[in-house]
Structure formats: structure tokens, C-alpha cells
Amino acid sequence: MPKEKSIGAVVFQKHGKELLFLLLHYSAGHWGFPKGHVEAGETEKETLLRELREETSLTDVQIVPGFKQQTSYFFKGRDGTTFKEVVFYLLESNTGRVRLSHEHTGFQWLPFEKAVKKLSFKNTKNVLSRARDFLQQRRLQEFSKK
């Protein structure tokens, strides 16, 4: 059975006290996160930053340490059923200016409640929930240090 590995980005930006998450509308019709295949010789983080730049033009981002979520699923393609693994990282963007690649037909920056409803697949909804929980826990830890 063929196998694929992609790296994805859960991208957020601070808008006042609210966090907004970036969702992309794929030409296939679903809403999801920026992601793409690992190329030969690339590390996961090199793939992450390359795919984010190619799909959104975002470069002014910081990877949030300590967050890494993996999902896997099967899909039917030209070569039959393929097993796909996607590893997601969490990134903070310093800008909301996105320029989409040809792979996408739209994007939105949304608060968690709206973003989780708009995402098309259960596994990406779970990744977003884990990212939000991670950020909330981190915020509580930072607050308790003050």
C-alpha cells in the first residue's frame, strides 16, 4: 500500500485578546490548514516553512515550541488506497496578509469557535482543539509566573 507524509501548519495571530486561526479553502472544496509533502532531503520544519510560504506567502512566523500533533487516514487515489500521515506544527503569524497559491480558492482568519465549525474533517477539528488547549495552558503558565 502506498504511503505519503505531509507537514501541516496551524497558524494563528493575535487580534487584541482574541486568537484568529488561518483556514484555507482547497480547490477540491474542503476547508483545512496549509500542508504539503515532504521533499527528499527536507526536515519536517523545512517542509513546514516552505509549504506555508508557497501556499500563503507567509514568512513572518514563529514556530511555537512544544506543539506537534500527528494524524493519519486512508484515501483512494490513482494508485488505489493510500495511507497518509500528517504532522502539524503550531505557528504564530505577525501578519494577516495572505496571498494564496493556485491550490486554494479562499482563506479566512477565524476565532476558534467559527474555525472549528468551518473545518471539513474531524481529524483537523481535533488538531485545532488541541492547539487551542495548548495555547490556553501556555497562557496560564505564563500568567502564574508573573
Image (tube, rainbow, N blue to C red):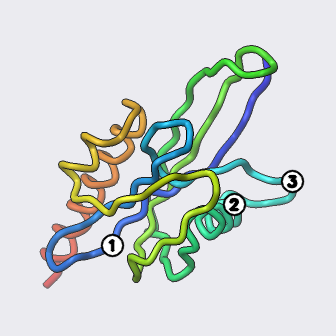
Query: Total marks drawn?
Result: 3
Q: What amino acid is labelled 1 in the image?
A: Gln
Residue 46 higher or lower than 10, as above or below: below
State the residue at coordinates (21%, 49%).
Answer: 114
| Left or right side of 137 for 1 | right
Near-viewer residue (24 or 81): 24
| Amino acid type assigned to the residue bearing label 3 in the image | Ala
Label 2 secondary element: helix
- The answer to whether 31 appears left or right of 39 in the picture is left
Pointer 3 local density, CA inside 10 Å: few below 14, some 14–19, many at least 20: few
Alpha-carbon span between mark 1 and mark 3: 31 Å
Q: Is residue 26 left or right of residue 36?
A: left
Question: At 55% from the left edge and 36% from the top edge, which residue is drawn?
Answer: 28
Dot 2 or dot 3: first in sequence order is: 3
Q: Give the residue type at disc 2.
A: Thr
Residue 13 percent coordinates (x, y): 33, 72
Q: Callout 2: few (<14), some (14-19), or many (20+) C-alpha neighbours within 10 Å?
A: many
Q: In this view, does 20 lie above or below 95?
A: above
- Residue located at (81% from left, 53% from top): 39
Residue 47 - label: 2
Q: Is mark 3 on a helix, strand or loop?
A: loop
Which tag, 1 or 3, sits closer to the chain's start? 1
> Where residue 54 sits in the image (x, y, percent)?
66, 66
- State the residue position of label 3: 40
Q: In which quarter of the image is residue 82?
A: top right
Q: How crowded is mark 1: few (under 14 residues within 10 Å), some or many (20 or more)?
A: many
Mark 1 and mark 3 in contact? Answer it, CB < 8 Å: no
The answer to which of 76 and 85 lies nearer the viewer is: 76
Residues at marks 2 and 3, CA–CA distance in whole angstroms: 10 Å
Answer with mark 2 or mark 1, whichever residue precedes in sequence.
1
Whether 135 is drawn above or below 38: the answer is: below
